[in-house]
Image (cartoon, grey):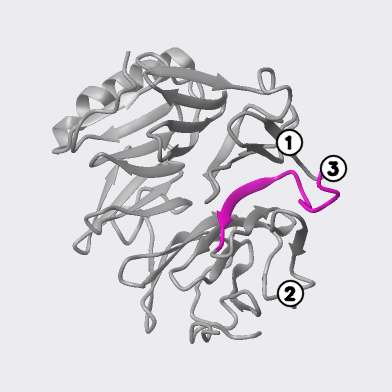
Amino acid sequence: MRQPPIFLRRDPLPKKTLAVALLILLWTLPLRGEKWVFYTHQNSGFPEAAVWAMLKDKEGRYWFGTGGGLLLFSQGKWTLFTPKNTSGALKGKSVVKVFRDSRGVFWFATRRSFLGGGGVTRYAGKEWTLLDKERTGGGLPSDYVWDIVEDGQGRLWFATDKGVSCYDGERWYLYNRTNTGLGLPGDSVWDIFLDGKGGLWFATDKGVGWFNGREWRNLTKYNSGLPRTNISVVYQDKDGHFWFGSRSSLWGGGGLIFYDGARWKVYTKKNTHGGLPHNDINVIFEDSEGTLWVGTRRGVGRFQKGKWKAFLVGEPVWDIMEDGGNLLFAVSRGVAVMVKGTLPPWGK
């Protein structure tokens, strides 16, 4: 069993106004040196809602988790799945996570609100199945599910606001602050990252948890150089360096944290001169050229050759994907595409 990393110790705008703004964005962004196309409900099959998550499967189909339902683009056709046409298996319309496991089964997390929703929906190609707190007998401790990851043994891990659930296909296992001895430092878990050696990293409201299949460790500002506690994202780049996204609060904080094994550095909107457009970090992504992209509450920052540059300023960026050389950004009313290859096949 490998040793843990050395630094881990035990201890909306009105619709008309928005539409005009998006059209202006579509025409003005190319002037900044990159070619952009913005897909919304006006020029594609996207519903008039935010896009939270994206996935392209092995069959070449595109799946989008949106605020209006689960959207599928396949063989030139759009299909929107909602609670109504899945017999309630999708518990809500806001789909915040789209995941496909190694067996080819799809898992979708829906956002819980006062209107309903929550839990996880399983789709094996024909049958839709709802798995929530009630139907799993508490295996999912909460209907607030934010992330889904599969480990090297085929077990699925679900990040919730009351700890982490692990499902091996037959049984559920719950991990929280108490039964991990604070190895999971906080019960509000926003993100899970599987590193190249099989270690699982958990971004929580009180730091980072780490699990190697046998033992738990934690990483907080009290036992390391981690300068923030409210961690929203964990990511390891191709060079093995770690990046931790955080969110701000009434007491400050937020920003992007870098760790290379020896030194810590925090990037914020201020010290990047706006190149990181906001201090609330939603997603971190490294493209095929080794460029880092950081999606925030108000745009995306590009970190390339030591320099920052902001794009989509003002737009919340929830997910990032590379496809056919293009970069796709899930935003408030559709998908923004930085065009480097052939245009996606979604336009009307």
Q: Main secondary structure of the magenta part?
A: loop
- Where's residue 301, x and y in %? 32, 50
> Which quadrant: the C terminus?
top left
Q: Give the CA separation, mark 2 to mark 1.
A: 28 Å
- The answer to whether residue 158 is magenta is no
Q: Which quarter of the rendered picture does the N terminus lie within?
A: bottom right
Q: Which residue is mark 1?
A: 130
Circles 2, 1 touching at the beta carbon (< 8 Å) = no
- Say which residue appears at 33% left-offset and 32% top-offset: 336
- Provide residue 33's location: percent of width, then percent of height: 13, 38
Q: Relative to residue 53, is residue 126 drawn left or right?
A: right
Residue count near mark 2 (Cα–Cα under 10 Å), binned few <14, some 14–19, many ≥20: some
Mark 2 or mark 1: name the one nearer the start of the chain: 1
Query: Tag 3: Cα neighbours inside 10 Å, few (<14), some, or many (≥20)?
Result: few
Q: Nearer the viewer, mark 1 or mark 3?
A: 1
Which of the two residues, 17 or 188, is positioned nearer the viewer here? 188
In which quarter of the view is residue 164 placed?
bottom right
Magenta span has 138? yes
Residue at horizontal 43 percent and vertical 47 percent from the top? 296
Q: Amino acid at mark 2?
A: Thr
Confirm or deny contact between disc 1 and disc 3 (CB under 8 A).
no
Q: In which quadrant of the rendered view does residue 60 lie?
A: top left
Give the alpha-carbon distance from disc 3 to disc 2, as whole Å: 24 Å
Counting from the top left corner in percent of width and height, residue 320 is at: 39, 44
Q: Secondary structure at mark 3?
A: loop
Circle nearer the viewer, 2 or 1? 1
Q: Which residue is mark 2?
A: 180
Residue marked by disc 3: 134
Q: CA distance from mark 1 to mark 3?
A: 10 Å
Magenta segment range? 134-151
Residue 280 shown left or right of residue 261 in the figure: right
